[in-house]
Image (cartoon, rainbow, N blue to C red):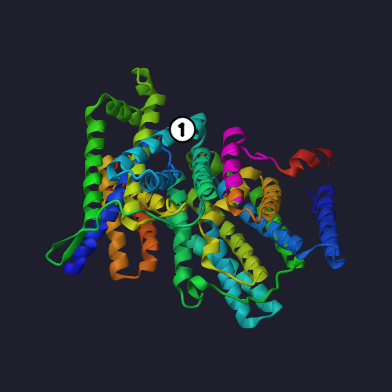
Amino acid sequence: MDQFLQQMVNGLSLGSIYALIALGYTMVYGIIKLINFAHGDIYMIGAYIGFAATTYVHLGFFPALILSMIVCAILGMIIERVAYKPLRNSSRITVLITAIGVSLLLEYSMMFFVGAEVRSYPKVLTNHLFHFGGVRVNMQQIYILVTAVALMILLQYIVTKTKTGKAMRAVSIDKDAAQLMGIRVDKTISITFAIGSAFAGAAGVLVGIYYNSIDPLMGMMPGLKAFVAAVFGGIGSIPGAMIGGLAIGIMETLVAGYGNSMYRDAAVFAFLILILILKPSGLLGKNEREKV
Amino acid sequence: MRVLSKKNIMILAGLILTFAIVYALRNFGILTSFHEITIAMVCINIILGVSLNLITGFTGQLSLGHAGFMAIGAYVCALINMELNSTFGFILGVLAGAIIAALVGVLIGIPTLRLKGDYLAIATLGMAEIIRVIFLNLEITNGAAGLNGIPRYTNWFWLFFFTVTTVVLISNFINSSHGRACISIREDEIAAESMGINTTQYKVIAFAIGAFFAGIAGALYSSYFYFLRPEIFGFLKSIDILIIVVLGGLGSITGSVIAGILIAVLTAALQSFAALRMIIYALLLIIIMLFRPQGIMGTKEITDLLNFSKRE
């Protein structure tokens, strides 16, 4: 039982990181129907910025987190402006291939400039252990959970209570109608990318602290898994992405803990194929009617 | 249309000439082993590009898992070949690899091809990843260390033979009524369905044929390079193949052939700058999509450009 609870705690920490990345996927997909393959790499860049900020500038945890979020937000907006905006009216396959291109470009530019080697994060947080019965929870896990929950509450507030959030929801429901109502669609899409990328940046710093190692290709797998999480929760749904992220994190830790850890990536993808076959709209997603 | 039309005779002459020139250069010792590897990669790239083009370019189903089928062909052929170690074993291995890849293609295609666009892309990516993880964990494939000492039977004759066979069979398929049905799915799936085309069936057929030839490419690869490791067939390999198709033009076999040659030469030239090569690939993808989304050839073939049909 203790071991199971321990796995759940580890799964929740990993899952809240996936959830933060999945939020960006789901928001971008909701608004322009694009799987932003580069999203996982923005998370990687976030991790490197956090690394640089803590190692060379000796910033603390929160300043590094905020710096990384700001830089990633700007990067996300630039990517949207340069690569995706000119393709607003192209076929989806074209935009998807562009997104793959952007993803490769970020990964290998990073590899070219900072080198391919794995770097280890400095100890920003204390390694203090708390014991709850037989379950060990360390300081990092608490920071990860608290930061993730705080960011999700902030996002929920932005989307449901502010004018920008209202515009984002309007654009995701019907872009043309939103434009007719005087909403600046391009600006709204830009803001969506900024928020999503900022969350990915935060996830990058958190994962760097949690796993203590970063490399230029680290974004590939978590990016894809976060996408699986977004699909599981129902793509386009913000609460869905949070639930999906936590579920995938817990599932992965359980497979690694009780089964063969070599199979955990395969398990996530097998799970994706199952969802797509059984309930493609996901847990909280809406069914879309096909129109001729 | 006659079998021995002027067009076909010219194509045949061109093929024989190409074969003879490379054969002669090789026998006179003008080609170094570096050239020979590049030539092998050209042929393998062409087979991979043309077969993925059938799925993605002609049938319009974006697949990000082509390397998975290649892996199946490679491993099956290598295992048979290491057991038998003869030309017969090699041919048996190539065919068995291709057939098993096609069967897996059908098995995976039936559930996943109901999905559209982006979802299909992710599902195929996941499928290739699952195949890779299975090879990584099986006893018989020797896990992450991979297979070593696979006997080499792939030579210029077999490379040329399989490349030409692939191109001829796939272009004939596309010009048949079945191929036209596939193209109609790309153009408008709902319209195709309402014209009585069983879209799921044709998507699965295209997927299986694509997988079959990817299996052949994998088999040739395994029997040329002596060793196999699961990580060769990762996500990046699938992207490599996609780049060939996109660069050449979605829906042009000639385009895939040209792009297959270009990419193989580019890869060989940038061999010692791996990161730089990937940056160039990435920029290539983005620039093509932004400025020339139809690729080098669009949906045209070389035969359209040379205007054979009018002269006849």
**Residue A169: percent from left, percent from top:** 30, 30
Examine the structure image and report whether residue B182 is included in the region drawn in magenta.
Answer: no
Identify which residue is drawn at 28% across, 53% down. Answer: A15
Identify which residue is drawn at 70% across, 69% down. Answer: B154
Secondary structure predominantly adopted by residues drawn in magenta: helix
Residue segment shown in magenta: B277-300
Residue A290 visible in the snapshot: no
Identify which residue is drawn at 29% across, 45% down. Answer: A61
Q: Is A95 situated left or right of B94 in this image? A: left
**Residue B288: percent from left, percent from top:** 60, 38
Residue A197 visible in the snapshot: yes
Residue A70 falls in image quadrant: top left
Which residue lies under the disc numbered 1? A78
The image shows residue B71, relative to residue A40, as above or below, that is below
What type is the residue that disc 1 sits on?
A: Ile
Identify which residue is drawn at 35% across, 53% down. Answer: A122
In the image shown, does B270 or A115 lie closer to the viewer?
A: A115
Examine the structure image and report whether residue B282 is included in the region drawn in magenta.
Answer: yes
